[in-house]
Image (spheres, rainbow, N blue to C red):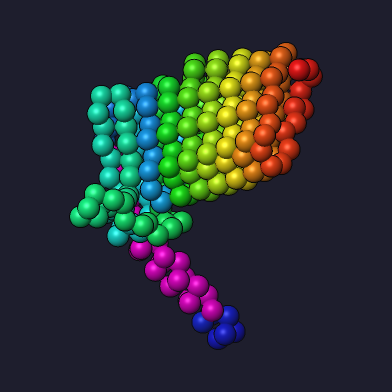
Amino acid sequence: MKSIILTSILTLVSILTFAQKNDTKPFPCKDFTKLELDGSFNVVLVKGEYCSAYAEGKTKDLEEIKMVQKGDQLSFTNIKKKEDGSNKSVNSKKSLTLYIQIVDLKEIESNLVGTLTNEGVLNFNNLKLEMNSVGATTLHFKLNHLDFEYNGIGKVELAGNAKSTNLEYSGIGSVDARDFLVKDMEVECDGIGSVKVNASNSIKMESSGIGSLKNYGTAKE
């Protein structure tokens, strides 16, 4: 009995200690249509009626993440500059997560070391997604058109639908877009890994990389 009580106390202390190390940091922002992500942290995107953002993590990590807004462009980074202007190396921040609520979006540029995900469905018109990141990406879209350039390292999973999509894959890892239903699609693949897509009406595929490229939809070249 004493052993059980002691274990429970130690567990509670551990939980409280962990909780005390975590905090939140709000980032007041205005509406934007371009989002830049650069650094080592995780990102969760949400479609909403107004723009908002906050980070959750350890206090010392929150102090490092900065936001800059110039017109309709919103940027987040936790990379510091050296005296010569080059970037300092950034350690992995697995417990640091940035939550961003978006009204409308036209472009995402990601240079993350971390995960990029979303809650619900990201419903926009035309979206350009440029990724040079390291880590897992899972996104659910409802779009008119997606222009997707991937030069990163990791696994990408796409779901939802779009009328048309252009995909350029030069990364290392995989893109699984079997649940991302597209009518008309163009795919260029010169990376390393597998690319799986789902086009129903028309598709043009070019592959010069190492790996596989396959359409799981009904469209024929």
Which residue is nearer to you in this view: 9 or 212?
A: 212
Q: Position of residue 15 (x, y in %)?
A: 45, 66
Q: Is residue 146 left or right of residue 174?
A: left
Of 187 and 218, nearer the camera is 187
Q: Is residue 140 above or below residue 17?
A: above
Task: Give the residues in magenta.
Answer: 7-27
Percent from the top left, x then y, of residue 20?
Answer: 35, 63
* Quadrant assignment, res 171: top right
- Residue 12 forms part of the magenta stretch: yes
Measuring 67% from the left and 34% from the top, which residue is drawn there? Answer: 208
Asked whether, in this view, residue 88 is left or right of residue 152, the answer is: left
Screen quadrant of the C terminus: top right
Count numbered badges in the picture. Answer: 0
Q: Residue at x 46, y 28 (%)?
A: 47
* Horizontal and vertical percent position of residue 7: 54, 79
Q: Please name the residue shown 31% across and 56% down the image.
A: 88
Q: Is residue 60 visible?
A: yes
Does residue 196 appear anywhere in the picture? no
What secondary structure prevails in the magenta region? Answer: helix
Residue 159 included in the magenta stretch of the image:
no
Residue 152, image x, y percentages? 52, 43
**Quadrant assignment for the N terminus:** bottom right
